[in-house]
């Protein structure tokens, strides 16, 4: 197995992603539960990062350890938050059209498995590499971007969770804290996380390996156009679209990047 990981790291990463996600897919299918979906997403990253680093043997650098630690930190934080949330809410309305429809459910899990694999590509290659000399300035800059995104993601998730947990806010949309300046600040933080880590590993990539930029590009496109913002915007329109206060919030508030409110006459 170690030889396979070292020789074909990209394909080894795909195999691990398939095994982990297919196992949890079976649980979701058999028990018709939403509780393991986001957990498996985070867990795949948490497994891949150390497996890739340590399978290549000794000689890994401090930057590789920090990269692995960053991915683990992100995965543990996100996984624990999402698990806590789903244990309270019991169901995820994203799966209302999938929970009892195996075809729709398997399509979602295939998308998730593929997304994890692609997102991890640049870090997969970097973690199994040895004797890479990286410019300190760029590494520091990349980790600063990562930490900025990580903090934004934590703060926005905590703010929304507390807001939704209060009975007086039932049936209301979140427009406090960071959410006052962005309709999806958590996704902005998520995008910064992966672009920051990509900046860290970028000097260690060359030639065809630069195509692994598909990793941060894919998470950006997924959140902007596929499984992130579009689904939540559609859900918000269904719940609040006839409310003039929500329409005002929507029209004045940035979609992604936290920014001051737009003027109402624009």
Image (cartoon, helix red, strand yellow):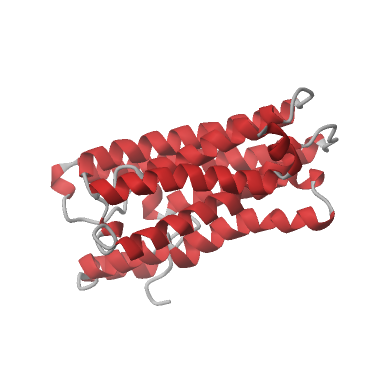
**Toward the viewer: 249 or 144?**
144
Q: Measuring from the top left, give residue 66's x and y in whole percent.
A: 66, 29
**Toward the viewer: 19 or 140?**
19
At horizontal 28% and vertical 70% (from top left) the residue drawn is 247
Q: Measuring from the top left, give residue 112's x and y in whole percent.
A: 47, 54
Q: Is residue 92 above or below residue 261?
A: above
At horizontal 41% and vertical 62% (from top left) the residue drawn is 107
Give the side of residue 129 with respect to residue 240, left or right: right
Q: Is residue 97 above or below residue 68?
A: below
Residue placed farthest to the left in the image? Answer: 167
Q: Is residue 242 above or below residue 18?
A: below
Can you see residue 133? yes
Q: Measuring from the top left, give residue 133's x and y in whole percent.
A: 85, 35
User: Image quadrant for the C terminus?
Assistant: bottom left
**Toward the viewer: 256 or 88?**
88
Q: How many marks can you see?
A: 0
At horizontal 61% and vertical 30% (from top left) the residue drawn is 50
Give the side of residue 150 with respect to residue 253, left or right: right
User: Image quadrant for the N terminus?
Assistant: top right
Residue 219 falls in image quadrant: bottom right
Residue placed farthest to the bottom in the image? Answer: 265
Residue placed farthest to the top in the image? Answer: 58
At horizontal 53% and vertical 46% (from top left) the residue drawn is 17
Can you see residue 156? no
């Amino acid at each position: 197995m170690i030889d396979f990981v070292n020789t074909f790291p990209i394909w080894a990463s795909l195999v691990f992603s398939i095994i982990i996600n297919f196992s949890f897919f079976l649980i979701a299918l058999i028990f018709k539960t939403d509780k393991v979906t986001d957990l498996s997403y985070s867990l795949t990253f948490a497994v891949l990062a150390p497996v890739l680093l340590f399978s290549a043997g000794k000689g890994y650098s401090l930057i590789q350890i920090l990269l692995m630690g960053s991915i683990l930190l992100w995965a543990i934080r996100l996984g624990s938050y999402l698990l806590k949330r789903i244990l309270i809410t019991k169901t995820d309305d994203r799966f209302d059209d999938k929970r009892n429809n195996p075809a729709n459910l398997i399509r979602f899990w295939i998308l998730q498995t593929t997304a994890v694999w692609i997102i991890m590509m640049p870090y997969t290659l970097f973690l199994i590499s040895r004797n890479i000399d990286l410019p300190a300035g760029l590494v520091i800059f990349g980790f600063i971007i990562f930490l900025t995104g990580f903090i934004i993601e934590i703060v926005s998730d905590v703010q929304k969770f507390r807001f939704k947990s209060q009975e007086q806010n039932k049936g209301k949309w979140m427009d406090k804290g960071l959410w006052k300046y962005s309709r999806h600040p958590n996704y902005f933080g998520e995008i910064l996380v992966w672009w920051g880590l990509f900046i860290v590993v970028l000097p260690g990539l060359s030639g065809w390996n630069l195509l692994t930029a598909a990793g941060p590009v894919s998470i950006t496109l997924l959140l902007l156009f596929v499984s992130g913002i579009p689904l939540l915007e559609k859900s918000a329109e269904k719940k609040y679209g006839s409310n003039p206060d929500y329409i005002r919030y929507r029209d004045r508030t940035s979609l992604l990047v936290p920014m001051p409110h737009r003027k109402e006459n624009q």
